[in-house]
Image (cartoon, coloured by chain):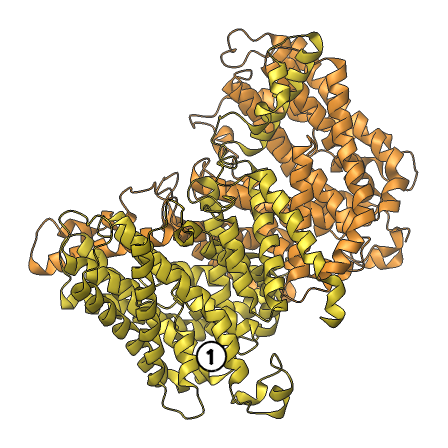
Chain colours: A orange, B yellow
Amino acid sequence: MGSNGRSVPRPFRLMLLLLGLAVLVGGPGSGLLRSAPDSTPIEQSTPAAEVQEHATPQATDQDHSEAGEPAHAEGENGHGPRIRDVFFVLIAILVSAKVLGELAERRGQPAVLGELVAGVILGASVLGVIPAQGDLYEIVHVLAEIGVVLLLFEIGLETDLKEMFRVGPTAVRVALIGVFLPFLLGFLYWYYANPSIGVHPEGVTFTVVAIFVGATLTATSVGITARVLSDLNRMHTPEARIIIGAAVIDDVLGIVILAVVSGMVGGAALGVLSVGKIFLFAVGFLVLAVVLGTRFAPAIFDFVDRMRTRGVLLVAAFCFALAIAALADLAGSAMIIGAFAAGLVLSSTNQFDAVVERIEPVADIFTPIFFVAVGAPVNVRLFIPGSEDFDLGVLFVGLILTVVAIIGKLVSGFGVTRSDTSKLLVGVGMVPRGEVGLIFASIGLTAGILSSSVYSAILIMVILSTFIVPPALKVLFARKPPSSPSEATSALGGDMNETLF
Amino acid sequence: MGSNGRSVPRPFRLMLLLLGLAVLVGGPGSGLLRSAPDSTPIEQSTPAAEVQEHATPQATDQDHSEAGEPAHAEGENGHGPRIRDVFFVLIAILVSAKVLGELAERRGQPAVLGELVAGVILGASVLGVIPAQGDLYEIVHVLAEIGVVLLLFEIGLETDLKEMFRVGPTAVRVALIGVFLPFLLGFLYWYYANPSIGVHPEGVTFTVVAIFVGATLTATSVGITARVLSDLNRMHTPEARIIIGAAVIDDVLGIVILAVVSGMVGGAALGVLSVGKIFLFAVGFLVLAVVLGTRFAPAIFDFVDRMRTRGVLLVAAFCFALAIAALADLAGSAMIIGAFAAGLVLSSTNQFDAVVERIEPVADIFTPIFFVAVGAPVNVRLFIPGSEDFDLGVLFVGLILTVVAIIGKLVSGFGVTRSDTSKLLVGVGMVPRGEVGLIFASIGLTAGILSSSVYSAILIMVILSTFIVPPALKVLFARKPPSSPSEATSALGGDMNETLF
């Protein structure tokens, strides 16, 4: 403890403050935060409103001062949620992310674990501060997406294109194993074990469900691992480069798989020609963005740099990241791949240092919102015996899927051939499914292919695979034989000696 | 022209690019951007979708690749607008704000004028990129509100509390004249001239309309003037301090007036006791926030400064600004007053420099969104002869209201008694009504007190009073006898000699 001992209780005081705030804006599971347009404002349910019924002159005055206020608030907001409520939710997200992130770090864990836990606490199943749908959800969702785009943009900025090419073949092997093995294992488990949990949707064959379950096991969530690597200051290790590279390729393959399973939702299988076309589009966009970007971005940013208005370089970089992300989505690729490509491209411009320095504070605001939003949909009642959502069968199937998910990705580490690079570290780094697995599962649920029990089992796999990775990577990096004396003295210390440039 | 001559055409090329982008995401007035949940995605209206009807095997493949894509996009977004469309709108807002801001600066105008014009062009009456309602509007609105909160927070950070107390009595005089004179002039004009434009709403007396029109003339939009002062690098002049102080007091008075007119919407007049209570709440919150904040903020931020996680100080400052703003709203005061108070408070902490440096890039992203959003509701058809919204009577009444609005605030400059401070500059600085006038008018319209013609006339007053101020302040500051040789050599040069500290 030492010098920390004195200040340890303080985070708890802050947490109490935070919980007070959360309760103020909305109790457990309450819908108070979602004030629909023209609905009764919160103030009118206070005792003051009840006084109105006994109309003394004094009370009449109070009546009008109460009536005046909502009109004011509504006038400021027009329709939609009150700005004030959005602010309270944002404050709850950011403060809890930082407080729990700090607590995680003080317990020797990566900060991102604390942010995920903050999301679970603020989510619909505990405090209900972040609703699962509605206007407020949408606003948080947009900010979270900007957050993950900025995260991948920053990772792209930190990535050296030449280094990426050097680890390229390894990353491709890791990605291919890590996609096809979990898919195969998941499919075989479901097809042969036939775990009949809950009601099986009518008219859907076990084969289709098995394919869908397999598909949810394929995609790595690059965000979680990248943040852990960044938290542990290991972004420049060979393992990190392989993981990031493989996760990006993984996303490209994920798009193809998503198109195939989405086609199944329509009731038919995709032809080989279409699958090839989707694959070429997804890969082609990334290549084209990097090639054209490296060609034209320097001139564009040299021009922007000569403009006079305040913040113009930052705004240009921010818009560049958003634009390539949106265009990637439009071209049938993934947003985060576009954002990563935008970062790669900008790392070759003269304004690189200025962009990195100025985009960092903006990312500091947006990225915690993403990780809290990833944690928010977690239903803790799945794990609490006695609660209505607890089902031993679902939990059991979820645990098996988790084991399948972990084995599939751990084996992908054998795609690594270099002896100085840890196969285990790469494998573990590929494990988290995070939001990508949730997207797959929710499509299956919406399309009526997955029953809510199967969806819950997949959810358990996504939760466990995401939450075990931050502490696991922490332990593995601490155990890895340090390659330099400086690293031996500090687990969080510089690892520049490991990089090749 | 000189050295600029070569690069002048380039902004136009950029603008063409921007316009192309704007047309890509939504044509004039089109609702393409607002993709309602489960509505037909844009892709399905492409020729490829028509091919589906002639079901050749090849076409079937295409069919599924088309069907796969929307599912992908929908899966990523759940309900609500597509993230991609939100990104395109944000890019259009930020790029047009910076390009037109740059053009404004190169023509010798404050950048904020360009941002307002960008808003008009992107607004519903021209390109329709920023819709007037719906999910996309709400998201832009929330980001704009964060923008104005950060703007006032930055102004608060730059403001010296002692200096504010020194100009206090002057600011109070300016604010009082600037609120009551426009109200009186507006009321008297409407009551005696009885301008009967359009249909008069049933059951509403001319007196009530006259009071409402008077009320819309009272509130200064501190945002516009503050940005102009900041663009011109004149934030530390005595005139700037008086204008900011008076505009803040003006907002407190505006809250009281808003409560009174909102009470009228309910059909009854407020008692003197209630008006007094609202006033005390609005003032009390500001005083309490500053007193308590100055007492406790240093300890809180010293504590935050000892935390280890990345960006924690910035996030704390951001949340502090949002929290005081939201609490101000909750207490019946105005958000921007809370944000200003938060800035004042933080300027006394040890982390002041670090906060200023890190909040700046975040503000650079959010504040342009606010000014574009202020420009967006402007209906240019009001000014175009031959268009359906053009009405000579409405235009005439709007021009008279504008004259009344300008005279009322110009006279408020006589609240200044010091000979070294320009009465005219202070008066002009108080003129813009901006979003505050729009809020008043929209309450009247929604409540059925103002006819749409009267609303349009008020809108003209708001537009003109907002748009004339940036160039007017620019000219007046250039004409003001320079108080130091350094100022004489450069119109945009340092004015540190004018400040008293």
- At x 54%, y 55%, the residue is B118
Dot 1: element: helix
Relative to A485, does residue A140 appear above or below in the rendering? above
- At x 85%, y 46%, the residue is A161
State the image coordinates of residue A458 (x, y, percent, origin top left): 59, 24
Count of labels in the image: 1
Say what amino acid the circle numbered 1 marks: Ala
State the image coordinates of residue A152 (x, y, percent, origin top left): 70, 45
State the image coordinates of residue A490 (x, y, percent, origin top left): 79, 58
State the image coordinates of residue B284 (x, y, percent, origin top left): 30, 71
Relative to A185, does residue B431 appear above or below in the rendering? below
Q: Callout 1: residue from which chain?
A: B
Q: Quick one: quadrant of the N terminus of chain B? A: bottom right
Nearer to the camera, A107 or B38 = B38
Whether residue A214 appears in this view of the structure is no
Nearer to the camera, B350 or A197 = B350
On screen, residue A430 versus residue B208, left or right, reads: right
Relative to B188, does residue B95 appear above or below in the rendering? above
Query: Callout 1 environment at 10 Å: few (<14), some (14 to 19), or many (20+)?
Result: many
